[in-house]
Amino acid sequence: MNPIVLERHLVSRLKFKYLRLLVTVGDQRNIFKAAQIHNMAQPAATKIIRDIESALEIQLFDRSSRGVTPTLYGDVLIKHAKLILSQVKHASEELSSLQGGLSGRVAVGSFLAASATLLPKAIARLKKDRPHVSIVIKEGTIDRLTDSLKIDDLDLMVGRIPEVPEEDGLRNEVLYREPVVIVTRADHPLQGKDDLTLKDVVNAEWILPPPETLLRREIEDAFHRENLNVPVNSIESTSILTNRTLLKESDMLTAMPLQVVKSYEEIGLLRRLPLKLMTEPGAIGITLRAQRQLPPAALYLLEALRLEAKVITQKYQDSEQELL
């Protein structure tokens, strides 16, 4: 179909309620469930989808006895439907914020490095001044959160800054740099030993982050620089609760951002080993969509993150021994 004609069909046929239905069908992979969510009969939902397919002369979903699966055309339309609905949501939030000045909603993706101090303190700062701002925190792998940011399911990401090519439409803002330290339970046999090196711990039990993470690559580089293999007696986990319990109940080691470790040292649960990982302090910051104007609630959180980052930076400057 001619692009101009297709655009006319999209503008004239796709109402917002149709877009919401398409997104829900794509998420649920089931028209009946999607119809229930939108409080409509399944035949009505099915007719809406078939009418859209007929008008656009494309098939949006493959049907089977187990449900529906978006086609390539369906994936494209659902992706843009999410963007459109997200912009409408942000417009309403901005209008509401202009009216009341203190409300709104922000969705933030969080990585481990931000979860212990930076993000919670920034949220506490924000809620003190704007208690009616609603905040949704989502955790996950870097690839999943980045995908969510690209389609506007997230307003921003915070933590270790990922590598984002310019063509991806994202940009990074570095807030501060944080070292990574090796940590064990407080009464681990290696605690108190002097002159430890990576060679002394290469055969120990380790908890390692998944291969696709920045921290994993830094750990591997540290061992390779010492002409050592990466520990093979290991498990892979990104769950801070699981890792904390494993460390407490075993002789395992892991590498964590300093701010995460400090929160557990304060309660005597974990403790740093006197062993340098010999990696450059990692960049902690914010990842945003480059061409998108953030809604007011997200701007409030962004400013709170910047202010808390200054506090953390000052603490590092005042206490050089923290920089291992």
Image (cartoon, rainbow, N blue to C red):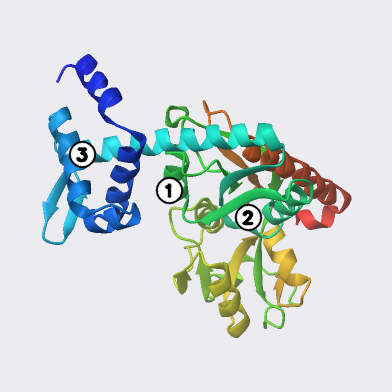
Taking 312 as reference, is 12 above or below it? above
* Kind of residue indicated by mark 2: Ala
In the image, taking residue 47 as reference, residue 237 lies left or right, namely right
In the image, taking residue 122 as reference, residue 20 lies left or right, namely left
Name the residue that disc number 2 marks.
113
Q: Distance between the residues labelled 2 and 1?
A: 16 Å
Judged by depth in the image, the label closer to the viewer, 2 or 3, is: 3
Q: Which mark is residue 72?
A: 3
In the picture, the quarter occupied by the N terminus is: top left
Judged by depth in the image, the label closer to the viewer, 1 or 3, is: 3
Circle 1: element type: helix
Counting from the top left corner in percent of width and height, residue 270 is at: 70, 74
Q: Which mark is residue 143?
A: 1
> Quick check: can you spot residue 24?
yes
Q: Which of marks 1 and 3 is nearer the N terminus?
A: 3
Counting from the top left corner in percent of width and height, residue 304 is at: 73, 43
Q: Residue furthest right?
A: 318
Counting from the top left corner in percent of width and height, residue 233 is at: 46, 74
Which residue is rendered at x = 48% and y = 41% of the image? 149
Question: Tag 2: Cα neighbours inside 10 Å, few (<14), some, or many (≥20)?
Answer: many
* Kind of residue indicated by mark 1: Asp
Which residue is rendered at x = 39% and y = 39% of the image? 82
Taking 250 as reference, is 231 above or below it? above
* Kind of residue indicated by mark 3: Leu
Give whichever of 85, 76 is nearer the camera: 85
Give whichever of 263, 83 is nearer the camera: 83
Q: In which quarter of the image is residue 211?
A: bottom left
